[in-house]
Image (cartoon, coloured by chain):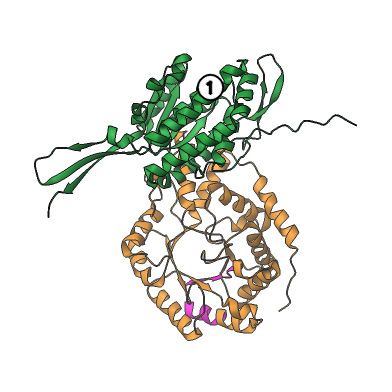
Amino acid sequence: MNARLEVTKTYKMYVNGAFPRSESGRSLPVESVDGKHIGHICHASRKDLRDAVGAARGAVNGWKARAAYNRGQILYRMAEMLEGKGEEFAQAIKQSTGDDLRSARKEVIASVDRLISFAGWADKFAQVLGCNNSVAGPYYNFTVPEGTGVCVVVAPDEPCLLGMISLMAPALCGGCTVICVGSEAHPIPTSILGEVCQTSDVPKGVINLLTGQRAELLTWIAEHRGIDAIHAANLEHDEARQLRLGAQENVKRVRVRTIDDDAWFETEECESPWWIEPFVEMKTIWHPSSA
Amino acid sequence: MRSISVDRVMADQRAASFTKRSIKTSMKESGLRLALSMVDLTTLEGKDSPEKVKSLCRKAITPDINDPTLPSVAAVCVYPELVTIAKDALGDSGVKVASVATGFPSGQYPLDVRLEDTRRAVEAGADEIDMVISRGSFLAGDRTKVFDEIASIKDACGKAHLKVILETGELETYDLVRAASDLSIAAGADFIKTSTGKVAPAATMGVTLVMLEAVRDHYLKTGRHIGVKPAGGIRKAKQSLHYLVMVKETVGDDWLTPDLFRFGASGLANDVLMQLGKLREGHYMAAYDFSEA
């Protein structure tokens, strides 16, 4: 009897609740750290980015309008699904990065915990970032945060899963919809994360995941007028500058962080509500306090 | 009238072939400008108000204030009650006023009511009348009645151009679309139009191809040009280019003018403007850069 052929996964992107290949038809080979061919991933084009922005824009009002508690539930559900696929993620990280399985699993667990942390923040950060202002008159005066809109996450190469989750979760928690350009060096976890989103009641368009080459997309991200915010980490100096320059086009909120490998695991640093703050706008409301 | 049978599989295949062309840079820009000039900017909702129509008319004349070189759209399409408002707002801009009439969108009213609806719209200043056929009568086989209705509404239009809406989404087969097209043309239609936009599916490439072929055959037989207007469901600039390719390769360059080909759409113009903005500025635009109406 012939040996059974392994059924390997076709790694696709995740856009608008579906799993498309790149509209350009392009793909990129992915190799393990020891040079073994692992598979191909989609090589996203600027038009894939454009389509993802369209999807994210279409989803933003619905996501913002959901009860904060419900956004938290959905992020928690993502954590549950991520935990369930934990071994697949760990193997993918190990294969691509060369990390041992133990550290790959540690990264997966930290990613699950990070989602749970921001799931918890979803209906609480408004109490921390917002306030009740004292005014001279018979009024209540509140300042409340609302999601900025469409946020692009440019994930660091490493840690490929934890970095991506850490940058996405605060924006999602704050009410933004997200387009994530996953790790260029280790893209397969980005592709698998789409399967987590699809089974977590994430409304279509709220999370969109692209794989490919960062340099090709950065200018288009920076200058796209339909993008309201950018959350990135550990970019080269020129890449960060490019993103910041583009912000002048439509006054984007651009936050480019520099975070050491170990620091990604520090909960005090990376699970702070101040990570949500760059992706919300403050709205002040006056309300009569008596008839 | 002898009916012509249409091979649905082949028609759909041929229609799909028009979506495979690569149209880039300057060709894309001129295609998009042409598509913009063919748009019937449409608002057909119960909540339409004079202010919304005035706003739509301003957009019709100057689609994008950031680019004064862009053409105006072909027409503004409204309910009869709002024709006067649109006429005043458009003035001598050259943009036409199209009014739906004849008991839009169902057409399920007595003929005298539908004729009166038409006369009033024309008296109010409509340059074009978009009528609906009685699909019920047509499907019941009473084609003479439908023919007579179209002919009498054409009379009531006077100088106004008559667009006959077939509502292809309710006609079930391409054979019936072709038969309704031939019937409408014979009864005096200046334009044949796919849909009201109130029934799904609205315009599709396949249905529009069948109608273009009816128009082509009529031209070859009589030398008379009849216009075609796909309406409903065309929202993307890229789709409009697909349609233009289909027009060019089915009926020829004569039809690449707003006088003979229109897009009935409410959302298409903004997507065309977004793409033209991208070509002009070199980066992607946001939907909120363009007014809704």
x then y, percent, for residue B112? 47, 86
| Chain label for disc 1 | A
Viewer can see residue B289: no
Give the chain coloured green. A
Q: Residue furthest right?
A: A1
Query: Closer to the camera, A106 or B111?
Result: A106
In the rendered image, which quarter contains the C terminus of chain B? bottom left
Q: Which residue is mark 1?
A: A107
A197 to the left or right of B47:
right
A185 to the left or right of A10:
left
The residue range painted magenta reads: B151-167
x then y, percent, for residue B153? 51, 79
Q: Residue at x 61, y 29 (%)?
A: A43
On whether residue B155 falls in the magenta region, the answer is yes
Identify the element where label 1 is drawn: helix
Tell me the colour chain B is drawn in: orange
A123 to the left or right of B220:
left
Tag 1: residue type?
Glu
Q: Residue at x 37, y 21 (%)?
A: A268
Q: Residue at x 45, y 21 (%)?
A: A233
